[in-house]
Amino acid sequence: MANILIIEDEAALAKNIARYFQAKGHQVDVAGTGREGVALAARTDPDVVIVDFQLPGMDGVEVIRTIRTSDPDVRLIMVTGHASVNVAVDAMKAGSMDLLTKPVALSTLDAVVERALVERSARKALAYYQRREADHSTLDAMVGHSPAMQALKSLLRTIASSEPQDGSVPPPVLIQGETGVGKELVARACHYAGARAAGPFVEVNCAALPAALIEGELFGHEKGAFTDAQARKLGLIEAADGGTLFLDEIGEMDLGLQAKLLRVLENMRVRRLGAVAERQVNVRVVAATNRPLDAMVQAQRFRGDLLYRLQVFHVQVPPLRDRGDDVLELAEQFAAQCAARYGKVVAGLDRSACDVLRAHLWPGNVRELRNVMERAILLLQGNTVSAADLHWLNAMAASPAQTAHSPNINESTNATPLNPAASRPLEAAERDLLLRALQQAHWNVTRAARLLNITRDTLRYRMERHGLQRPLSGLSMD
């Protein structure tokens, strides 16, 4: 059911239209003058307004313009018995979506109203999703209070406030980091935290399409530019005008296309395939990659001049293993989101789960953590996530990836290196690693935990799980 407002000075006609739409289940209000209609629109917030052109005191064009100013989403339809080109042009400029001439059939008016309601619903849905995307892409949406994240947020605030005062193009941004650290979220924060938040955010994955197709997507083409070009196509660079163009996986971009992108960055002009004239755009370019671009430049697989142009602002997103207890904040958030999605009641994480999450190195970073928490919630039997619900992570603590990032235990001693044999089961290798660290620390748990780069609580938990107890002597366990 919709709310329809009829502004018509012919009482009989207004009554007939109102009865027709009321019979279809709509709420209908009627006003006999333009000023009365404007006041009624302010009170009732209509979805569709049907306006007569000739109204006493205030004509229909002025009514449409006034209502449109106060509510940009309302759909307005003008009905007139004196249609002319000038009236039609003025009505459309004021904000009318259609112009009908009297006498108008109710079935025709009904069809236009139905189209207006569909358009309004689509606009409201689009506005909702745009607001939701913006809300989930701000700096406040970036979870974590570690020093690494605080430094990242500070840099992003600087980037967001770097919009030139003369209306020129802001400097490009290059985001680098391991797979799964959240480079796309950082790119969105660069857009939504700044002056371009109301503009478009256009994303292109350079690894998803062949070079020829990516070029067509970026630059567009004119009708007839090639065999299958049946119509003009707007390129994504033009589509991002006034906003941000996010080039994800830019390390996969073809060298030839890199040269064309460099030219766009230099003069901010694009030319569609098959076109003669170039078009000026104002786009902030944000690029992201997990590839070592410096090494690729040395190997002549990436243009050095493009790299220098892109990294006016260089953002290095920290891996999850360097973010301390941010992993627990993220895990709590993912657990709550998954619980809501699957209709489960989850109280949170217990101490043993926190120990397991802290000890894991997260080679897949935030993406891996999200998937781990989703699996844990799906298989959860109780209402609290414990170490038992993360059992598949326990065996990974002594993997080669873990030891590669741990401090060298032998830096402070001359003991045998703690390199577990690759042929042993992971559980046995972990037990051996813990035992060697405890022996080197003379069974002092604090020192052993420091050697292993884990917390004392994590070490005590793993000692209990592997049945490790200090020898019966006076050696300290503190």
Image: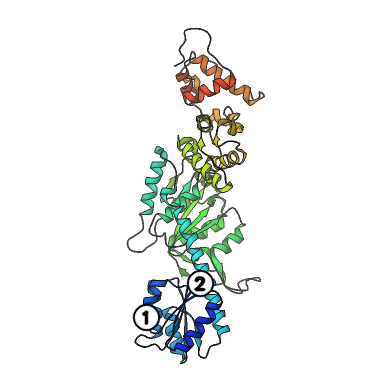
- Residue occupied by mark 2: 2
- Residue lying farthest bottom? 82
* Residue lying at 39% horizontally and 87% vertically, measured from the top left: 55
- 227 over 305 or under it: above or below: below
Q: Position of residue 229 (x, y in %)?
A: 62, 71
Quarter holding residue 221: bottom right
- The answer to whether one can see residue 201 in this image is no
Q: Position of residue 428 (x, y in %)?
A: 63, 22
- The answer to whether one can see residue 56 in this image is yes
User: Counting residues from the N terminus, which is met first, the one under dot 2 or under dot 1?
Assistant: 2
- Residue occupied by mark 1: 36
**Dot 2: few (<14), some (14–19), or many (≥20) neighbours within 10 Å?**
some
The residue tagged with tag 2: helix, strand or loop?
loop
Q: Position of residue 110 (x, y in %)?
A: 55, 80
- 455 over 191 or under it: above or below: above
- Residue lying farthest top? 473
The residue tagged with tag 1: helix, strand or loop?
helix
Please name whichever residue, 153 or 225, is drawn nearer the observer in this view of the structure. 153
Instruction: Give the colour scheme shown.
Output: rainbow
Residue type at mark 1 is Glu
**Would you say 216 lies left or right of 192 here?**
right
Please name whichever residue, 400 or 336, is drawn nearer the observer in this view of the structure. 336
- 246 over 348 or under it: above or below: below
Residue type at mark 2 is Ala
Could you give the CA–CA distance between mark 2 and mark 1, rounded to whole angstroms? 20 Å
